[in-house]
């Protein structure tokens, strides 16, 4: 199970090192700013990892807001150009549109700046955008068929059985493993019979995918746990989903891809030394195949 990596990657006594990996594409900050971001995010993430369940409910929101206050050069605050943000949303919608109709009730969990949710509101019946950070959503103005809901990071505060399509992008890895399981059960409960949960999350085998990528072999920042396809499949089945489908991004086209070859690739990469695995798994073709883009379907009758 993925949770076996929980202890492997925790090394609280290890001193911070200078960045050892090449500068990430698009990174415009100095190494000193990246190191500052890493140290602050790791400190806050460790607080979240060690917190009891009851405290985590408030800490998700508090710690993300604290991160954005203490790291004013955080990429999510600096943002991207409007043109680049439109391209990012266009790519997500290209995958989502096959599942959306004018009568769909759509929910995005971890909506961030809500750019996607607001765009989706123009093509579906109703949209709920779920987010933990008041800081990142402070400029969002809900209106019409779009509603913004602040959450504790685990609950899904909508009526049971009210959602046709739920979606999260780069969210699962930010949850404590125990909370991830609980959130999946809550998402399952929020869906109507036959409803679909679409989940996009990085594969642990080409990670880390958070700020610790330039320092550590396993995620130590706010990616509290990264997963493989096998892990996610087991978690979704445990939450009650009847079918799990995988999709690969092939030059901007999203094609359904059998689980078997993905599992075989993961088995091979899992045996390789980190440096070799990272070089191969983090190439564009492998990321397309290994990247976890999943449709989980709720049974029509439980």
Image (cartoon, grey):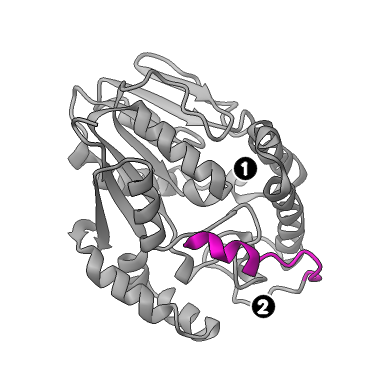
Whole-percent x and y of residue 12? 77, 64
Task: Please give the name of the residue rendered at 81% of the width and 71% of the height, measured from the top-left corner.
Answer: 15
Residue 13, placed above or below residue 160: below
Give the camera-side residue of 281 and 182: 182
Whether residue 111 is visible: yes
Q: Which residues are magenta?
A: 1-16
Helix, strand or loop under label 1? helix
Task: Please give the name of the residue rendered at 29% of the width and 42% of the height, measured from the top-left corner.
Answer: 241
Helix, strand or loop under label 2? loop
Whole-percent x and y of residue 97? 22, 39
- First in sequence, mark 1 or 2: give its number: 2
Q: Quadrant of residue 90?
A: top left
Whole-percent x and y of residue 139? 56, 26
Q: Label 1: which residue?
A: 77
Task: Please give the name of the residue rendered at 22% of the width and 36% of the height, measured from the top-left corner.
Answer: 299
Q: Quadrant of residue 215?
A: bottom right
Q: Label 2: which residue?
A: 20
Position of 149 with respect to 119 (left or right) is: right
Whether residue 87 is visible: no
Whole-number angstrom distance, CA of label 1 to CA of label 2: 25 Å
Residue 52, placed above or below residue 249: above
């Amino acid at each position: 199970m993925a949770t076996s990596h929980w202890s492997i990657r925790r090394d609280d006594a290890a001193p911070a090192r200078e960045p050892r990996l090449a500068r990430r594409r698009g990174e415009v900050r100095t190494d000193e700013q990246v190191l500052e971001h890493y140290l602050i995010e790791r400190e806050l993430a460790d607080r979240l990892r060690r917190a009891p369940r009851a405290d985590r409910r408030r800490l998700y929101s508090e710690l993300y807001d604290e991160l954005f206050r203490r790291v004013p050069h955080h990429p999510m605050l600096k943002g991207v150009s409007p043109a680049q943000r439109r391209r990012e949303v266009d790519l997500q919608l290209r995958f989502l549109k096959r599942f959306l109709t004018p009568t769909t009730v759509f929910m995005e969990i971890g909506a961030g700046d809500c750019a996607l949710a607001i765009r989706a509101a123009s093509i579906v019946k109703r949209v709920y955008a779920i987010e933990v950070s008041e800081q990142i959503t402070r400029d969002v103005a809900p209106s019409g068929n779009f509603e913004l809901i602040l959450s504790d990071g685990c609950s899904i505060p909508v009526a049971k059985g009210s959602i046709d399509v739920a979606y999260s992008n780069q969210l699962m890895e930010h949850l404590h493993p125990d909370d991830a399981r609980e959130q999946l059960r809550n998402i399952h409960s929020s869906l109507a019979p036959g409803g679909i949960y679409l989940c996009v999350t990085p594969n642990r085998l080409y990670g880390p995918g958070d700020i610790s990528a330039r320092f550590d072999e396993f995620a130590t920042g706010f990616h509290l746990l990264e997963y493989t396809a096998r892990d996610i499949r087991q978690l979704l089945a445990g939450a009650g989903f009847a079918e799990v489908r995988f999709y690969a991004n092939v030059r901007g086209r999203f094609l359904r891809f059998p689980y078997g070859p993905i599992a075989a690739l993961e088995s091979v990469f899992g045996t390789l030394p980190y440096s070799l695995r990272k070089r191969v798994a983090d190439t564009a073709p492998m990321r397309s195949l290994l990247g976890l883009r999943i449709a989980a379907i709720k049974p029509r009758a439980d």
